Amino acid sequence: MTLERSDLKGYEFDRMVMLFSMMDGAKEVPCAISTSAMDDLEHAARTKPNEREEQFLRLRDRIEQCASRKFLAREFEGSPRGIILRSIDFRN
């Protein structure tokens, strides 16, 4: 099953990640992407914290495709178990 789009939770400054969720049927899957991964995707240098949500929305389709690939590969980590995306996850 492929994940479906869910909520944007927001930017977490302390961890330097954008939090979001995806849905596996009725089950919410917590997800995060590092700010460095988003900057790498846009070839940008250190996007300002107040611009992170807009950046995520521009990149959302690519981010969610990568999250779905990691979900299908059962690459969960963290607590609660979820999908964490880093720059390396977008390299072919």
Image (spheres, rainbow, N blue to C red):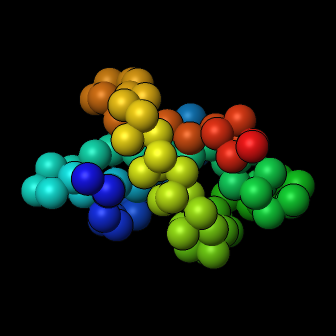
**Residue at (75%, 43%) from the top-left corner?**
92
Q: Is residue 64 above or below residue 61?
A: above
**In-front residue for pair 6/35:** 6
Expressed as whole percent of the image width and height from the top left, the position of residue 10 reads 45, 58
Residue 24 falls left or right of residue 65: left
Write down the quadrant of residue 51 in the picture: bottom right
Residue 91 falls left or right of residue 62: right
**In-front residue for pair 55/60:** 60
Disc tally is: 0
Can the viewer see residue 86? yes
**Residue at (80%, 63%) from the top-left corner?**
42
Expressed as whole percent of the image width and height from the top left, the position of residue 86 reads 64, 38
Q: Is residue 73 above or below residue 40?
A: above
**Residue at (56%, 46%) from the top-left corner?**
33
Q: Among all residues in the image, which is located at the extreme left?
A: 26
**Residue at (34%, 67%) from the top-left corner?**
5
Expressed as whole percent of the image width and height from the top left, the position of residue 27 reads 15, 50
Can the viewer see residue 14? no
Expressed as whole percent of the image width and height from the top left, the position of residue 11 reads 52, 54
Residue 28 falls left or right of residue 77: left
